[in-house]
Amino acid sequence: MPAPTGIMPATLRKDLRLEWRSKDAINSMLFFSLLVVVVFSFSFDPNAEESRRIAGGLIWVAFLFAAVVALNQTWAREIRNQVLDAYRVSPAPANSLFLAKAIGNFIFVSVLEALMTPLFVIFYQLRPLGPTWQLLIVAALGTWALVVNGTFFAAMSLRTRSREIMLPLLLFPISIPALLAMVQATANVLTGGGARVWIALLLSYDLVFTTACLLLFETVLNAE
Amino acid sequence: MNGYLIAAYAATWIIHIAYLASLMRRYSRLKHDIEELKRAQT
Amino acid sequence: MTETAPVITVSNLIKQFGRFAALRGVTAEFSAGKLYAILGDNGAGKTTLLRTLAGLNRPTSGQITILGAQKFGDICHQVGYMAHSSLLYDEMSGRENLDYFARLYGISESARCTQAIRAVGLDPDLRRPVGQYSQGMRQRMSLARALFNDPKILLLDEPFSNVDIHSATGMVHLLANIRDQGKTIFVVTHQASLLDGTADEFIWMEAGQIVARTLDLQQTARTT
Amino acid sequence: MNKAFPILGILTALLLSYALYQALDVAPTEQTMGDVQRIFYYHVPSAWTAFILFTVNFVASLVYLFRRNPASDIVALVSAEVGVVFCTIVLVTGPIWARPVWGIWWTWDMRLTSTLVLWLIYISYLVLRRFSSSGETPILAATLAIFGALCVPFVYFSIWFFRTQHPQPVIGGGGSIDPRMLHVLLINWLAFSCFALLICWSRYRLEELQREVEQAHALESLTQSPRSSR
């Protein structure tokens, strides 16, 4: 029996529709990262020249924490009425579900970034001195790096006790290289340098971990 | 002999012995478990 | 339909959850075109048996053969599964739910979904999200979700719980009809009396084992 | 097998004391750092041992994913746990060494930082093992181990590149190592590897026993069939 096609887009559409109706993930993410921006600006002087150097770190840490909020939400939805079991008894391949979830989270986090970045720019009076287009690439690659591993580890922590705490514990150590690359690339561009090596690093990180996720997701989904 | 040197060597062995002690504790708990199991069977 | 050929064979099935064995060596054969009622106390292993048949639990040891296949993945499109939870998204309407699940089975014609919803006595054009359904309606929609792919084997976990007696008898009639089309149905239930006279066989489970198989309810009541 | 264990134990004890004597007495005193440099003979062998154990963890996890045999799962668990112990020693002795030599307890230098990240990864592995329900632990843990191992090159490269971009205190000074020092280092490494093997062995036995007991509990409930609820 050939595997049915078009499952990935159908699942993605379903997820977007659910999010549109409940707005659980995006609201909590927005509020959360807003809090982070405000709290950070209390702890540092946002007007100093220094802030340009640390802003890259602040932005990405804020987005990382916000992404964790969204990542926990995506699978919570599937667990609520055990709907995940319905997916597992169906002939649909596990990777379609994974890709749909990862792309969905990518969209959510990108929307968040698009909404929050102007706020950061205003609060911290940022003006990139380096090539801005590189920032876009860094944002896209970096977000995917966080989201692809995050989706995977969220599915993993689904099967553990105290799963909400488990996700950051699993995700953060593995994400350190990606986070370092994102922060450094952003800081470089803001202070007037280029970020080609960091972009290359992010790209290979994305490739390696996306492959690993796709190879191992079925095992995790059906782990018992 | 240098104080830092002694501290480092001592720290190494303290960590190893602490780990071994935790293994011992787990082992004795297990033994207790096994005995209980045997008693339940008879 | 040959009555003699077993459609499901289970041999020495053991399922262990850590220190607790939910199934302790279940061996049985089930033939096509029959309605089996699985009865027993809480914790007797009924749900675990059903989940193991549905491929959701990996047996610790023992073998299952369904429709001649050892791997559940090969025949999953011929099995319908209804769990204790609804396996539906609360935020979407019944129709939207079924349309999504139909995609998972590669079913593109939506007539099948409409038909399934009608079969359980609900209105396919109901726009309300499932979360606002009454318990009985949700239960019936959940049955429709298990039915829409026209499965050869139906696995139902407590389909009559929280359903009023009128709807429950309606569901029993429906199940009898489906059985008469040559399908095999397993019903885990506490309300055995509902199936009295309809079920072909009553399977009594106790402490993870099948302790009795009888043709009518009274017979078992006498032996135990 | 049961006879080999005490023999290996005595041998390891002898080797460790010989290595200690070599490190403290035989090895020449380093000119600039003095006696403090002798931390080297504990610090570096611990690091090597930890890395070997983490490699074992990766291989065992891979084998587990393909073969699903409990033995390789136990090997993976044991090597990660003992590896974390050795890695902890590296992280503790490192600053004790850094303080008198560089005047600071911690520097975000390439090796310290990447060891710390490695340590974090394997701690999260052990946490996952503790928090997942028993039936699925091996699979989830094996998956995480593979992710962790894939991450190692990225950790090294990113931190290396991060460091080369930023000025930092000059460390080490390079140059070749005195052959007598190398000799002592290798003896210490051998001693600590034997010690690690010994711990792993007993930890393996412990885990095996633990699983047997678990099994016995389940079987007991099989035969006695109590009315326990799920």
Image (cartoon, coloured by chain):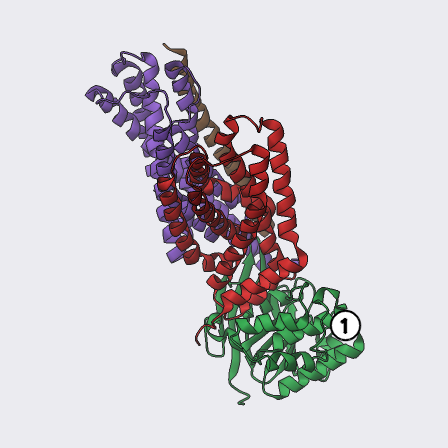
Q: Residue at x 44, y 54 (%)?
A: A213
Chain painted in brown in the figure: B
Q: Residue at x 46, y 73 (%)?
A: C74
Q: Is residue A133 left or right of residue C31?
A: left
Residue D35 placement (x, y as % from top left): 33, 12
Q: Is residue C171 left or right of residue D53?
A: right
Chain painted in purple in the figure: D
Q: Give C25 or C151, whichever is nearer the viewer.
A: C151
The three-letter amino acid code for the residue at tag 1 is Val
Residue C104 placement (x, y as % from top left): 53, 71
Residue A175 placement (x, y as % from top left): 46, 42
> Could you tell me if residue A180 is visible in this image?
yes
Image colour for chain A is red
Q: According to the image, label 1 marks what residue?
A: C163
Q: Residue at x 58, y 71 (%)?
A: C101
Q: Residue furthest right?
A: C165
Residue C142's quadrant in the figure?
Answer: bottom right
